[in-house]
Image (cartoon, helix red, strand yellow):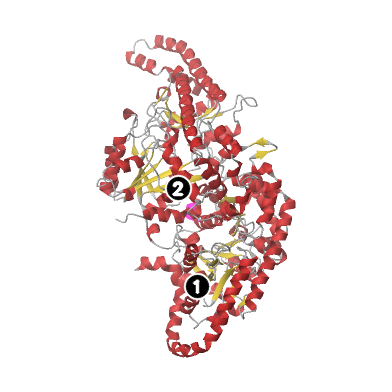
Amino acid sequence: MEIPEKNSGRGGAILSKIATNDQHGENSEYFDGWKAYDKDPFHLSRNPHGIIQMGLAENQLCLDLIKDWIKNNPQASICTPEGAHQFSDIANFQDYHGLKEFRQAIANFMGKARGGRVTFDPDRVVMSGGATGANETIMFCLADPGDVFLIPSPYYAAFDRDLRWRTGVEIIPVHCSSSDNFKLTVEAVEWAYKKAQESNKKVKGLILTNPSNPLGTMLDKETLKNLTRFVTSNNIHLVVDEIYAATVFAGGNFVSVAEVVDEVDISEVNVDLIHIVYSLSKDMGLPGFRVGIIYSYNDSVVSCARKMSSFGLVSSQTQLMLASMLSDDRFVENFLMESSRRLGIRHGVFTSGLKKADITCLTSKAGLFAWMDLRHLLRDRDSFESEIELWHIIIDKVKLNVSPGSSFRCTEPGWFRVCFANMDDDTLHVALQRIQDFVSKNNNKLVEKASVHDQTIQNNNAKKQKWRQGNLRLSFRRLYEDGLSSPGIMSPHSPLLRA
Amino acid sequence: MDLLSRKATCNSHGQDSSYFLGWEEYEKNPYDVIKNPQGLIQMGLAENQLCFDLLESWLANNPDAANFKRDGQSIFRELALFQDYHGLSSFKNALADFMSENRGNRVSFDSNNLVLTAGATSANETLMFCLANPGDAFLLPTPYYPGFDRDLKWRTGVEIVPIQCSSTNGFRITKLALEEAYEQAKKLNLNVKGILITNPSNPLGTTTTQTELNILFDFISKNKNIHLVSDEIYSGTVFNSSEFISVMEIIKNNQLENTDVFNRVHIVYSLSKDLGLPGFRVGAIYSNNKDVISAATKMSSFGLVSSQTQYLLSALLSDKKFTKNYLRENQKRLKNRQRKLVSGLEAMGIGCLKSNAGLFCWVDMRHLLSSKTFEAEMELWKKIVYEVKLNISPGSSCHCEEPGWFRVCFANMSEETLNLALKRLKKFVDDGNSKRSCQNNENQRQKSSRKKTMSTVSNWVFRLSFQDREAEER
């Protein structure tokens, strides 16, 4: 055999375009927070001054309920004496239809998570590798490279990767604004659609997350109905990612697109255009188990997605366990109720704690996070640069990892997503304490500073006005003068976003 | 405007192929020793069901792993939340060690060079996304696993160009065939990005020889933009591990670590065949190319392995006593089972390609064809499915260039079922022998139309690969 020449080249040029472009989004500066957290992670006893992770939209509030169920139901595991007789059949089972019991249990759970207002057909339940896999797969089914999907912003940052990276699909944001409480309107969608068409783009559909990440808000029934009418009249698809469906706090009203499909007149909605993405990662807090679901009313899409599910089936071991768990109606009903209750309480504690620091959040009744308004703390309300500066202060001085609005493509600087369900009560308390301490400390400092400044600028009324408004901004200017390093772009290597 | 994507509406997922149609027939009428003794016996499924007892007894003796416990403490919460695409390090370490053991510890694997994926299906697709652009081509020796048409081509837009292998030399890859395939790709204006082999081979059941590996490595040494992907999913099914040569051994033995070839050779692995755990969706990509590892790791987000499963298997594979015994026992049972099938077939005048691995035999039924055509192969296949009630895979579904070969699986059933299958087949052959004299007259008639058939046959293999392309060209 001939020995080839020695060569120290790494061979980067010989990979595909997809492998070598940046479309996976992981080189974004938004991973600075994660990197800082990884270096100095908070622990109540071992590292009480570390950074508290509030950038991770995980639901850790009800894992105890699930753990107890597993303990009490050994037959649901293929590894226990009670369940081992199923081992070989399950270990062997790779049918991409999935276990029938699993699909039925998922359909059952989805219905219950929507208060029993709709039922789901197990034969339309298709598996995928988490919602990550589901979102990519639905794009592969509905759009060709170069086609466009509209998406309301702010939106989950990883959509840039999930929807676009390997599919070649383009996404165009439909901007929502704070003046409207970031509400999505049909008019905004129509406008974005028209603009896209004018630029000769082929729009294949609209994709939205409801309840919203990062906002935590939900679409009202009328808007949802009008959106289904809009897509129908334009013959484009509507994909609704309902991954946060059961994170609605007690008292909140979630309307699933499935309910709308039931209620809207058949002449007004073409069900072949309606698709739901779901997962157990948020509602149940089981992201490790990789349970993603595509639910489509379009038979061809179900068929295609099912074939594609070969690329990301749910482990049969996991299917079996969940088939048993989610068909236990008593467990499911109690779980949903308890989860809703705990999330509501947690949200309440968090938002009222923020209020003490004069920080308000967008009113929301769902999600694992709050959409925090820190515009009054920006050095310059119109600049994203100052949002990033503020963000670095929060990481380095307040020692919290939160997510800046710009990472969600928000068009207005100053909004931050803060997660509250991925920690215990004590940690939440510490986080709130830090925020309150920081805000009050800097408020006191600048009361003195403000009066000094007032003397020096007595002649200038306009400026005086500005100082009063910019009270808190002064504190940050002070910090900048104290030699805070300016935000750099560090290349992250931390494992990908579970944002 | 088309409602769905082109991918959704074309059929390059390949599921209309006869390979899958046989399965559908089986689904309608599956054999069961008690409930349906006249049903179809599934011999088209390359599953390994011979060693479940070993796995079950391990589970019975290791309750901690079963119950989300480590040292008696519950780690349920940790696992429920674990979605790091780097994977559970204890699992990757155990998997890397297992892969070494499979190769008689002649090479060692670094867990940092491993990417976990949802089965080998996902691993193969992911590698295509990493190594090739839409419209690029990979060369594959025929016959090959029918699923590759979907896994390598469907969503990636990559093309497959066959390296034709023939029975004249035991279906070995030759330098000539490789060069011809390369030329063919050039003629079709396809940029060749790599070669993909399955070693041991599916459907042949043979390990790739030193000679073949030399040919392949020579080729990629000369052609510096070409990758070599070795799907070693059947590595643990080799009856005698010393007969298996992994591509990583070639690299080590020839000290290729400091050459650019080092960055262009990649392995795909899975626990679906060796351990018989296809339901758990455990696949892996192994590469020394850091850029490939980096890109593939990110892509694995689309199909991670369930943390619950990673945890169970990390405990299982870390038990070295278990793995050593398992590998040895697995090989023994597979070898015995293969022998039973081979001798059973021999007794009815049916030969097989001499094989030393795999969960199947590559069976020579050319002498049972009414004519040397793929139509006759289909005819024979249908008889075997509908009359003999055995689902086996016709060679054409594996893109074999010669009609008359069939892949017959032997490890997915009990010994009794295998005996019954052989009995049924023997009856069919014996009946056929008596009918054969009548058929000689038929053959004379068909001889004149044979020439025409042969030219359509040579297009057949390409048509299966290029179905999609032709549609676009129209």
Work out whether residue B48 or residue A82 is closer to the camera in this orientation and state it: A82
Q: Which mark is residue B396?
A: 1
Q: Is residue B446 above or below residue B34?
A: below
Q: What's the chain of the residue with tag 2?
A: A
Q: Residues within 10 Å of mark 1 (few under 14, many from 20)?
A: many
Magenta region, main secondary structure: helix
Q: Is residue B352 left or right of residue B439?
A: right
Q: What's the chain of the residue with tag 1?
A: B
Where residue A106 appears, as percent x and y from the top left, is 46, 44
Q: CA distance from mark 2 to mark 1?
A: 33 Å
Work out whether residue B169 or residue A249 is closer to the camera in this orientation and state it: A249
Residue at (58% x, 50% y) in the render: B116
Q: Is residue B193 above or below residue A208?
A: below
Check disc 2 and give the amino acid type.
Ala
The residue to which callout 2 is attached is A134
Magenta residue check for B105: no
Where residue B44 appears, as percent x and y from the top left, is 55, 66
Q: Is residue A352 left or right of residue B354?
A: left
Q: Residue furthest front?
A: B34
Q: Residues within 10 Å of mark 2 (few under 14, many from 20)?
A: many
Residue B421 location, quadrant: bottom right
| Start-end of magenta stretch | A14-18
Q: Is residue A1 above or below residue A24?
A: below
Do we see residue B114 in this rendering?
no
Q: Secondary structure at mark 2?
A: helix
Residue at (50% x, 61% y) in the render: B152
Q: Is residue B354 left or right of residue A138?
A: right
Where residue A237 appears, as percent x and y from the top left, is 33, 48
Work out whether residue A447 or residue B270 is closer to the camera in this orientation and state it: B270
Magenta residue check for A16: yes
Do we see residue A41 in this rendering?
yes
Q: Secondary structure at mark 1?
A: helix
